[in-house]
Amino acid sequence: MDWLDPVRRWNTLARLGLIALGISTLLFADQFYEHLKAHLSGSIVDDVITGEWHVVLFNIALFLSFLIPLTFRRKADWKEYTIVVAFIVSLFVEMYGIPLLIILVAGRGSTPPPPELDTPLVIDFLGVEFAFTIPMIYGAILILMGMALIIVGWVQLFKGVKDSELVTTGMYAISRNPQYLGFMLVVVGWWVGWPTILVTVFAPIIMILYYRLCRVEEGEVGDLPGFEEYRETVPLVI
């Protein structure tokens, strides 16, 4: 590999960083296993935050606002994002409002007692106490990384759109779709931190949707001057 090529160098470092983050979870394998089992079995039903509708509305508004940058590159067809909107709404209603699916799963039979997971981080936000387990902290790291990519990509893309030019610098010199990479990291982070049946079913569907949108958008900008050369040198996602 030519390490003088900045695109290859930064992409390799990004891949290695994500791999290292994934491997480090093995240090807490028991915590991740119990965390996953508790969410899928519904044994967390008594520990779920409920009735905090102001937290539900805040998170729905926050994450839906991140869809706005998707309109900068092309005219948005909001039908494409129906499943994403439905997922975001149902996710936060389950997390902080009424966990209907968790209650249904927990009520189907003998539910194991909730595991005793470490909570090294406890914060108070909007008047609600949030206790973060180790898997939740990992999930939050991925979500914050994804949000940062979306914001940085948004700013760079907005500047390029104003000048009516193909954006190939900044984050777009490393990935042709840094915003979608950010969305994918957010979805993976949600699943790591909150691996309920709802998220486990929706996460791969949304990942496929984002990948498909990458391809659709590239087909729409394929005629722009310099795009073919850009596509040959910069990867689709990472």
Image: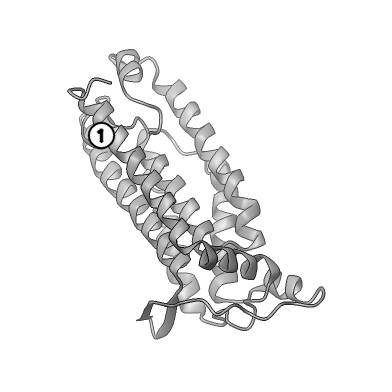
Q: Quadrant of residue 138?
A: bottom left
Considering every residue shown, the one lying at the far right of the view is 109
Residue at (59, 56) in percent of width and height: 86
Q: Is residue 167 left or right of residue 218?
A: left
Residue found at x 58% / y 56%: 87
Quadrant of the rendering where the N terminus is positioned: top left
**Relative horizontal placement of residue 229, taking residue 49 as reference (left or right):** left
Q: Is residue 168 visible?
A: no
Q: Is residue 71 above or below residue 136?
A: above
Which residue type carries mark 1?
A: Trp
Position of residue 25 relative to residue 20, above or below, is below
Q: Is residue 20 left or right of residue 97?
A: left
Residue name at image x 58 percent, y 63 percent: 33
From the top left corner, tell me how far across and down residue 155 is, in percent: 24, 44
Residue at mark 1: 10
Residue at (51% x, 78% y) in the render = 53
Which percent across, then down, holds residue 188? 49, 51
